[in-house]
Image (spheres, rainbow, N blue to C red):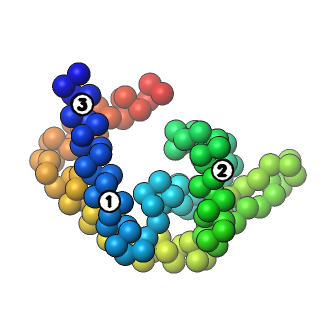
């Protein structure tokens, strides 16, 4: 329980700090930023919303609401899937790529400051391995 509670406290402290910093520079909320990055890293033709839900561990409705906001902001575009004609694919727009390019340096600095810097390289490597093992069970 001690490790679990420490994880929850650390997650809360780091995520709140990242949210504050994003808000101070008029950036995207942390969750939407994560989804935009995942879509940008996806296949050139686009990413299916269902794949995004699996990768993000969000509910389909949560992903849908976030995607709707990203589309409304002009950061993501929905396309018809050419292989089945019924499904949708998500692609990052030029505006979305510009936003990611502008926000990346400050976002990476914030992650370093509020997550990585307090740890030694050995601690960070051990934490990464442990968290990846836990994530793989879900």
Q: Which callout, 3 or 2, points at the residue further toward the start of the chain?
A: 3
User: Which residue is the site of mark 1?
Assistant: 18
Please, is residue 70 above or below residue 25 in the view? above
Kindly identify the residue that appears in the image at 56 percent across and 72 percent down. 96
Kindly identify the residue that appears in the image at 24 percent across and 40 percent down. 9
Rendered location of residue 47, percent (x, y)? 65, 53
Rendered location of residue 80, percent (x, y)? 81, 58
Q: Which callout, 2 or 1, points at the residue further toward the start of the chain?
A: 1
Please, is residue 75 above or below residue 35 in the view? below
Q: Can residue 21 be seen in the rendering of this structure? A: yes
Rendered location of residue 127, percent (x, y)? 24, 38
Element on which disc 2 rests: helix
Bin the neighbour count of mark 2 within 10 Å (Cα to Cα): few under 14, some 14-19, many 20 and up.
some
Q: In the drawing, does residue 55 fall left or right of residue 78?
A: left
Between residue 37 and residue 16, name the one nearer to us.
16
Spatial CA distance of label 3 from label 2 is 30 Å
User: Which residue is the site of mark 3?
Assistant: 5
Between residue 108 and residue 66, name the one nearer to us.
66
The image quadrant of residue 130 is top left
Q: In the drawing, does residue 68 fall left or right of residue 121?
A: right
Residue furthest right as drawn: 85
Spatial CA distance of label 2 from label 1 is 23 Å
Q: How many marks?
A: 3
Kindly identify the residue that appears in the image at 27 percent across and 51 percent down. 14
Q: Which callout, 1 or 3, points at the residue further toward the start of the chain?
A: 3
Spatial CA distance of label 1 from label 3 is 20 Å
Please, is residue 109 above or below residue 48 in the view? below
The image quadrant of residue 137 is top left
Q: Which mark is residue 64?
A: 2
Element on which disc 3 rests: helix
């Amino acid at each position: 329980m001690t490790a679990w509670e420490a994880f929850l406290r650390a997650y809360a402290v780091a995520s709140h700090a990242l949210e504050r910093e994003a808000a101070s520079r008029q950036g995207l909320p942390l969750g939407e930023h994560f989804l935009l990055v995942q879509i940008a890293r996806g296949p050139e033709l686009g990413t299916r919303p269902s794949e995004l839900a699996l990768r993000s561990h969000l509910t389909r409705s949560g992903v849908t609401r976030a995607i709707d906001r990203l589309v409304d902001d002009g950061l993501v575009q929905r396309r018809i899937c050419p292989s089945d004609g019924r499904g949708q694919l998500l692609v990052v727009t030029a505006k979305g790529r510009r936003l990611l390019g502008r926000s990346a340096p400050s976002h990476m600095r914030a992650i370093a400051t509020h997550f990585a810097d307090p740890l030694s390289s050995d601690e960070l490597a051990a934490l990464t391995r442990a968290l990846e093992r836990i994530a793989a069970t879900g």
